[in-house]
Amino acid sequence: MKNIWVPLSGQIAQQRKVEIIANNIANANTAGFKKDRLVFKEHLTALTKGSDNIDLPNKEWSPDDFYRTQGAENAYVKVDGSYTDFEQGDLKPTNNPLDMALFGKGFFEVLTPNGVRFTRKGNFAVSKDGELVTDRGFKLLSPPKAEGSQGGDQAAQIADSSDIEKRIIKIPAGTRISVSKEGEIFSSQGSLGKISVVEFNDIHALKKQGNALFINNHPKNVKRENVATTVNQGFMEGSNVNAIQEMSELIKAHRHFENIQKAINTYDSISGKAANDIARF
């Protein structure tokens, strides 16, 4: 019965895959959403023991030789980890001057109650205090004064810093704005500031925190200079989830799950028959 843990490990892995795909499909219409993927890992007894212990007969093979499994019957499956696919989503026109989409690998820098976070979701609005905020009320930031310096990056991680408060972008009531590709904000009176758009040396170091937010735990990972990402006013970036492709993967995962369940039921049936037959003797 110990071999039942092999298909069971695969079933647990497939269940996790179903959950990830279902979450991707649920966010197929969420602006700026980035889909997740799983990485599976297989444990092979032969690899654990080393090549010296692999017994392959140097002779003319007989049918019995093909029963040498090299520990493959203990090839357990596990989820080795997950990662976010940061593929660019489609830009959709909205004609709303406060909607902004990023084209490139960059992120908007916003201030939340838990500190500075990063997002690709650019459906902004002007709050009653005249601040440019996200749909969740998080405040959009401008670049730090010492742009590109390590001190600026460190300060960006402290939510209650006075420097952070100075970076909050404010729009006078009733002001119509235009935003350049570089994130410069203009009105009929002139420049109102600049949107902070940053890139990362290792984008996969970012961690999802929900509500289309990401956290960066390594200040030196932030790249503020020579940012190639452009800001596109009047557009929204759609999710990078292909709903048809994800539905196809979901069907495959369900079928794999069902096939593994059949294997487990077979193991259980064999075990039950063996116990009953032995009891008769």
Image (cartoon, grey):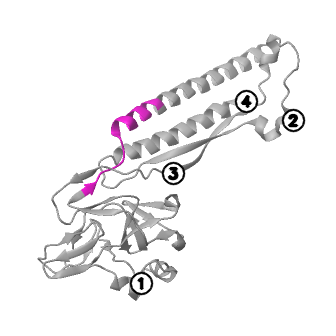
Residue depicted at x 30% and y 51% = 238
Kind of residue at badge 1: Asp
Q: Position of residue 179 (x, y in %)?
A: 23, 69
Query: Horizontally, is 122 left or right of 219 in the view?
Result: left
Q: Is residue 37 above or below residue 144?
A: above
Q: CA distance from mark 3 to mark 2?
A: 35 Å
Residue 268 on image: x %, y %: 64, 24
Label at residue 83: 3
Q: Earlier in the sequence, mark 2 or mark 4?
A: 2
Q: Measuring from the top left, give residue 41's x and y in whole percent.
A: 63, 41
Q: Dot 4 corresponds to which residue?
A: 72
Using a 10 Å C-alpha cutoff, classify the residue at mark 2 as few (fewer than 14 neighbours), some (14 to 19) or many (20 or more). few
Question: Which residues lie in the magenta part?
Answer: 236-252
Residue position marked by numbered label 2 in the rendering: 52
As drawn, the label of residue 264 is none
Looking at the image, tell me whether mark 3 or mark 4 is earlier in sequence order. 4
Above or below 177: residue 53: above
Query: For the residue labelled by badge 3, is the local secondary structure a helix, a strand or a loop?
Result: strand
Quarter of the image for residue 182 reads bottom left
Closer to us: 205 or 38: 205
Q: Which residue is mark 1?
A: 160
Q: Mark 4 is on which residue type?
A: Ala
| Quadrant of residue 196 within the rendered picture | bottom left
Q: Are marks 1 and 3 in contact (CB under 8 Å)?
A: no
